Image (tube, rainbow, N blue to C red):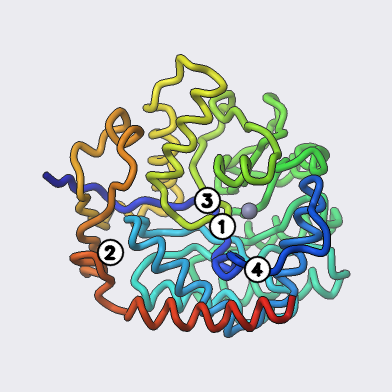
Amino acid sequence: MTAVTPGLVCAHHHLYSALARGMPRPPRTPRDFPEILELVWWRLDVALDLEMIRWSAMLGALEALEQGTTAIVDHHESPQAIEGSLTVIAEACAEVGIRVVCAYGVTDRHGPDGARRGLEENRRFLAEGGRGMVGLHAAFTCEDSTLEQAAGLAAEFGVGVHIHVCEDRVDADAPRRLAPFTDERWVLAHGVHLPDDHALAGTIVHNPRSNLNNGVGYARPARFSNPVALGSDGIGAAMLDEFAFAYFCHRADDVTADPQTAWSWLENGRNLVPEVLDDRVTWSYEPVDPWYVAYTPGIRPLRVEVGGEIVWDEGRPTRVDPDEIRAKAAEQARRLHARL
Ligand SMILES: [Zn+2]
């Protein structure tokens, strides 16, 4: 028994984090979210070079495809390898055969020159016709002038800004500082600590598994009037799993919750990358219905067509050699871990 659906979308991903698994332990155990950033992610991102970025994106794209996810809305940061990084990611995804919306996460953590170079990478990629958005890391690591410039750049290219918002209490000031800039094209990742009456426009991306992992709290996304979509925040791109996490988190908070709500968040991802409506995923199971999928782990695609081309068939990608990708990614992971 099979069912066919359009492609799934991971609405907030960090393809660069595919090589983080198994990384050396931080010098001490992080005790809260700011320490997780400082001791894990900000040590990792600064060690990335373009070759590592390429193979982490290849691996992440392969892992998306094998879950029926045909589009990723990616948020990238590599402070020592900014120029050209978005093209490396876009080319890796195209090689595997999936769609990606790229953004470079601009920040003032590395001074005004780092912010300028990040903005320039977004501009370069968009000006060359790349499918992208303008990225900002988060309001709490950016000066007001950087927020304003990123919003201006996005408006210039007719795209939204992809930014982390209120993932943790440390970013509590974000709604006030972003209020003058947002519009419905923006992608606001997390929103865990956004007040109900935050007044920001855009799609809020709920990342339930990542939020559990970081101990930042439950976003209670059902309370928002904004559209809500689902992301992985870098933990793969298994969106049926992410739907189940979203549903069970919702149930833990409110046992009357219906899986249709989390399912609508999964489907909203398609509004960010409507091209996936042209994609066809044939699943190993039917019906692909929220009440069934929520309680059926392990559903996998048998065949995936992206834009008319079969890119996954009989358990394998058709365009690339998965063993080569895993081997090359492992080699780059060893290089990366050695730097840490
Ligand atoms: Zn994120």
Q: Amino acid at mark 3?
A: Ser
Residue 133 position, x and y percent, is 57, 61
Name which residue lies at 45% across and 55% down. 237
Q: Mark 1 near ligand 1 (CB under 8 Å)?
A: yes
Mark 2 = which residue?
306
Mark 1 = which residue?
234
* Cα separation between marks 4 and 2: 33 Å
In front: 330, or 69? Answer: 330
Tell me whether circle 3 and circle 1 mark residues in contact (CB < 8 Å). yes
Mark 4 = which residue?
23
Q: Quadrant of residue 180?
A: top right
* Cα separation between marks 3 and 2: 21 Å
Residue 251 position, x and y percent, is 49, 23
Name which residue lies at 61% across and 83% down. 50
* Cα separation between marks 1 and 2: 22 Å
In front: 296, or 82? Answer: 296
Is there any visible trace of residue 128 in the rendered image?
no
